[in-house]
Image (cartoon, helix red, strand yellow):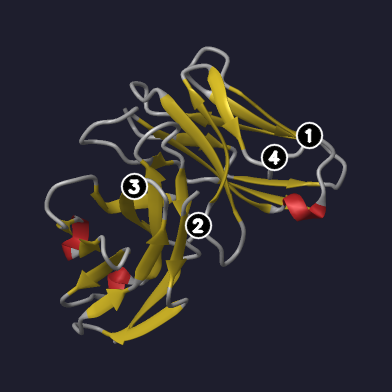
Amino acid sequence: AQSVTQLDSQVPVFEEAPVELRCNYSSSVSVYLFWYVQYPNQGLQLLLKYLSGSTLVKGINGFEAEFNKSQTSFHLRKPSVHISDTAEYFCAVSETTGGFKTIFGAGTRLFVKA
Amino acid sequence: DTGVSQDPRHKITKRGQNVTFRCDPISEHNRLYWYRQTLGQGPEFLTYFQNEAQLEKSRLLSDRFSAERPKGSFSTLEIQRTEQGDSAMYLCASSLLTGANYGYTFGSGTRLTVV
């Protein structure tokens, strides 16, 4: 079984500052890794994903994440945030075989201040 | 294709009533998933379909919950004898089976309030 731990429930940051949202996962099998963003009263939108290959993946809205297999981490970063980045961010892990069921972390609320 | 559609967006019901939600996935996606999300939490897996076959159900899905995908296209999720603890956002997602484009596309969700 897989599990996901998002280490920060809330991250306040000033506009144009860099940000890192931390995610650790646990799994006994190989996995795919994802970050999703959720704006208020909306569904989740895929930001980026790691399936294989390069461990540094780039996504939409200037976000990127690095897969670190030895540390079982998949931290999300952005060099300069905007007010519009204020949202809930979910790290997720999916098994690479079978049902491809995705397990989500509890979320990190990113709050960008002017 | 306009993405994953869920209907209704909001539902308020009295405890003990039955409710049904509908999800229309992206047409070429053969996998369809239902999740439940409560305030301040991440989505929790409920069940998924590959085409019309329901392949896995979570222990969260009590006997009061039933899901169908009769023709491998749209899906319904029914909750019988609703309880206040059923109040949540119910999310539907669809995906291709595998491939470089793998990843969920979510609908906007149905927010259920049981009073």
Alpha carbon distance from label 2 to label 3: 29 Å
Say what amino acid the circle numbered 2 marks.
Asn
Q: In the image as oriented, which residue stretches furthest toward the left?
A: A54
Nearest to the observer: residue B45 or residue B77: B45
- Residue under pointer 3: A31
Q: Are marks 2 and 4 in contact (CB under 8 Å)?
A: no
Height in image: A54 above or below A17? above
Judging from the image, mark 1 belongs to the subunit labelled B
Alpha carbon distance from label 1 to label 3: 31 Å
Q: Are marks 4 and 3 on the same chain?
A: no
Nearest to the observer: residue A95 or residue B66: A95
Say what amino acid the circle numbered 1 marks.
Asp
Q: Are marks 4 and 1 in contact (CB under 8 Å)?
A: no
Judging from the image, mark 3 belongs to the subunit labelled A
**Which numbered circle lies on residue A41?**
2
- Residue under pointer 4: B61
- Choose mark 2 or mark 4, whichever is in front: 4
Instruction: Give the SS element for disc 2.
Output: loop
> In what quadrant of the picture does the C terminus of chain B appear?
bottom right
Q: Is residue A38 visible?
A: no
Height in image: B89 above or below B30? below
Sequence-wise first label, 2 or 3: 3
- Choose mark 2 or mark 1, whichever is in front: 1
- Image point (31%, 85%), residue name: A13
Instruction: Give the SS element for disc 1.
Output: loop
- Residue under pointer 1: B63
Alpha carbon distance from label 2 to label 4: 23 Å
Q: Are marks 2 and 1 on the same chain?
A: no
A83 relative to B63 in the view: left or right: left
- Which percent across, then down, holds residue A73? 31, 66
